[in-house]
Image (cartoon, rainbow, N blue to C red):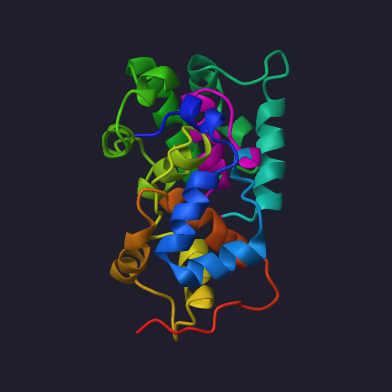
Amino acid sequence: MTTSSQLEESIDYAVAIAALSQADPILAALIANVGACTLSLGRQKGDLLYCLCESILYQQLSGKAAAAIHRRFLALYPDRDFPTATDLLSTLDDDLRGTGISRPKIVYLKDLAQKMLDGLPTMAELEGMDDETIVQTLLPIKGVGRWTVQMLLIFRLHRWDVLPVDDLGIRSGIRRTYRLAELPDKKTVERIGLPWKPYRTIASWYLWRSLDMKTPESTVPVV
């Protein structure tokens, strides 16, 4: 298990990139074309309430739309950087709706706030858990699925071996990089990603970046 402190010590990702390039020549070509991994620059900050609130607000929205809603949400609490769980529970639903948050997401946010008060782990406590334990601990929160927890693992807890098999960007990146005829299903993503262990997070970052490239670099089909 890789902790955030370990990530800080290995911020250049050199060991991971070398291992991935040796294990998968198609991925190696993508890595060479994308260049240095800058995953660390996208690291999330804040406590569990902040991170999961942000994730819920961003679900199923474009980044621009979600960012605008997030700003209006934070503006409801001008005296603090971020609301506490008690603040959130005390906020009228109509006020939350006024920021553009959908009714289902209001339910999710308030369920999260209540569960925070009931005793969800702190970030420090999550650091001591393995990935799957964290997933199972947070899944009971309404609106929080495996993908949401995986984003927390990648961008807040800095775990190095996370492969979000249901992520559309990952599936699209694999289709493009490996020249597949259609989007891969979960089993195909897992099969292709097997050689990437224990650095599947880094591989995922490169697959996301592949979507920014003008043309796919790999010409080798996966059979």
Q: Residue at x 60, y 41 (%)?
A: 12
Q: Is residue 157 magenta?
A: no
Residue 115 in sight: no
Which stretch is magenta? 41-60
133 is higher (above) or lower (below) than 197: above
Quadrant of the image containing the N terminus = top left
**Place of residue 220 in the rendered image (x, y in percent of width and height, measured from the top left):** 48, 83
Q: Residue at x 44, y 24 (%)?
A: 113
Left or right: 217, with 117 as reference point: right
Quadrant of the image containing the C terminus = bottom left
71 is higher (above) or lower (below) than 117: below
Quadrant location of residue 189? bottom left
Q: For this rendering, which residue is in front, 77 or 130?
A: 130
Residue 23 in sight: yes
Q: For this rendering, which residue is in front, 111 or 122?
A: 122
**Place of residue 32 in the rendered image (x, y in percent of width and height, measured from the top left):** 62, 64
**Place of residue 97 in the rendered image (x, y in percent of width and height, measured from the top left):** 60, 39
